[in-house]
Image (cartoon, rainbow, N blue to C red):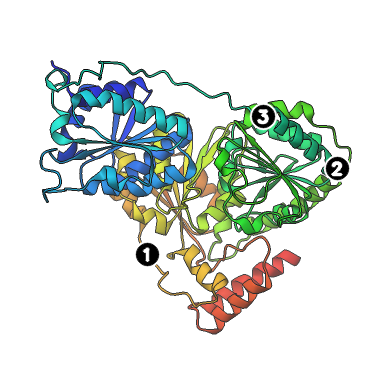
Amino acid sequence: MAETAGDVLVQTLLDWGVDTIFGLPGDGINGIIESMRKRKDDLRFIQTRHEEAAAFMACGYAKTTGRLGACIATSGPGGVHLLNGLYDAKLDGVPVIAITGMQFHDLLHTHTQQDVELDKLFMDVCVYNARVMGPAHTENVVELACRTALTRRGVAHVTVPVDFQSEEVSKGKRTPRNVAHHVSSVQAFKAGMPHEDDMAAAANLLNAGTKIAILSGAGAVGSGPLVEEIADRLGAVIIKPLLGKASVPDASPFCLGGVGLLGTRPSQEALEECDTLLIIGSCFPYIEFYPKPGSAKCIQIDIDGARIGLRCPVDVGLVGYAKTTLEHLLPRLEQHDDRSFLETGQKRMKVWMDLMEKRGSVRDMPMKPQVVAHELGKRLSDDAIFISDSGTIATWYARYLPFRYGQMCTLSGNLATMACGLPYAIAAQAAHPGRQVVAIVGDGGFSMLMAEYATAVKYNLPVKILIIKNNALGQIKWEQIAFLGNPEYECELHPIDFVKFAEACGGKGYRIDDPALCGRQLDVALADPGPVIIEAVVDPNEPPLPPKVTMEDVTHFASAIARGTQGRGDIMKTVFRDKIREVL
């Protein structure tokens, strides 16, 4: 059988290690879909219910494998739907290739059906973006798309007019300069080593520091033992942005937990008091949580030189891979005998963890969301992959689900988009069929793409989806009240029975609403061999309190209550009880 442009596209993806692609068929990609059908034993196609979910799955697949994620969508609206998931990949620096269709090449720009120039639409989201101009163009474009996505850790997009997809390569016009098969799938890696003078300068600053904090981000994932060894040598504390949660264990003696509104009080205090800050592979976006300019010396390690000094003034920038850089930096560092800064952080962390234990163990009714997350955290297996959606749910993920070496965890970082939790979990389970995969999601985020649970059932992917059900857009509600001082408005959600929904899709559903039974019920649900939804009904008036409450927060909160926030009596009782427990 003659080779078509679609065949070339599929073979090139395979050459670059793509083994799974997420998407929906459509008439704008029929030629490519047929080529995938012919290679279905080599390239697994997972059919989604929405193209946005397909892009999230490609992103989640890349995040949990380190390989190139792939998604496909038809022309026009199908391609448009990919964008949110692709921006998620862009903002977190994840390699993804998106394949889309276009209408017949000689009808573009003539108001034909689904006449959307997706290459123009995708210009901002991509590190590589191309329209295939004929069968002989396909290999060149797809090869470079895969190479660029991996090298620049971003989104590559290839769009192919539908008539080219089924056209035989032998019949396509090839220009004299376009020598057949002049490209390859050999990937090259840069050395990733900073300049020698910069390494020496960084070591001098770290050796001179007395109160050293390490901000360990996504770039440090996989280098945890090195980060801990450096912290031990310097008497430093380790603080983790959300995307760096998997860089070192939460139980590490150097770790003060997360940073920012979802973080811990000890981490915030350490950043306020440190005289030296080492940033490893992070561009944590909340500038207000960094040391004030001029108060601390700063060394930053990043693979992208453009990100050096992005959030706070940097004294030394080290451009290179985190692991390679740390390996060469460690021998230059002197042993610090003064452990007082570290010991202060450890004492504060014990107080904080005691508080988290109290809040995670209360037996109040309605059940607190902290209780559910706390009980789940104790039940994650040694090789678990656990995932969070965005919203208040990320607070419970950050504080109550402890990471250990051997596990994997992730969420949407810089985009902080809702609805990613379920698709991420499906992708992670598809990539790692033998591992426990659990997603903790809110009812708002889950309901956006809840049809994808049927995808998990269809492919018998035993994901466990824990829905924290408070019938509200919780994060927005508390932002309106505590950050803006406005009464809550239009954040309440119409309730959905997620147990019945799970059963309607052919899966299993469990409901938890009693804190005394929560742990035992989680044991049963997590042991179920198939895809499961766990609906945990929680107190809608439990706020995700920041690690340190400011007078401005108190003023805004009081203003919102006084101006008529719905359920203000219950909210006040909940907050009052929480603060009483803090001081007992």
Residue 18, horizontal then vertical, whole percent: 36, 26
Kind of residue at badge 2: Arg
**Residue that badge 3 annotates:** 195
Asked if 533 appears above or below 156 in the picture, the reply is below
The one nearer the camera, 106 or 143, is 106
Image coordinates of residue 423 in percent, x first then y, are 38, 43
What is the three-letter code of the residue carrying label 1?
A: Pro
Mark 1 and mark 3: Cα distance apart in space: 58 Å
Gap between marks 2 and 1 measured at Cα: 52 Å
In the image, residue 320 above or below residue 287: above
At 71% from the left and 54% from the top, the residue drawn is: 291
- In the rendered image, which residue does mark 1 sit on? 495
- Amino acid under label 3? His
Q: How many marks?
A: 3
Q: Looking at this view, is 191 or 265 the one in front?
A: 191
Task: Report the residue that reaches farthest toward the front.
Answer: 176
Q: Residue at x 26, y 44 (%)?
A: 118
Which sits earlier in the primary sequence, circle 2 or circle 3? 3
- Please rate how many residues cluster around mark 2, counting C-alpha atoms within 10 Å: few if below 14, some from 14 to 19, many from 20: some
Q: Could you tell me residue 89's position as x and y percent?
A: 43, 42
Q: Nearer the viewer, residue 322 or 406?
A: 322
Q: Is residue 71 left or right of residue 339?
A: left
Q: In terms of sequence position, does the residue under pointer 2 or pointer 1 come before the other?
A: 2
Query: In the image, is residue 139 above or below residue 126?
Result: above
Rendered residue at 42%/65% (across/down): 471
Q: Does residue 362 appear in the picture of this structure?
A: yes
Task: Answer whether labels 2 and 1 touch (C-beta < 8 Å).
Answer: no
Looking at the rendered structure, the secondary structure element under dot 1 is loop
Disc on res. 339: 2
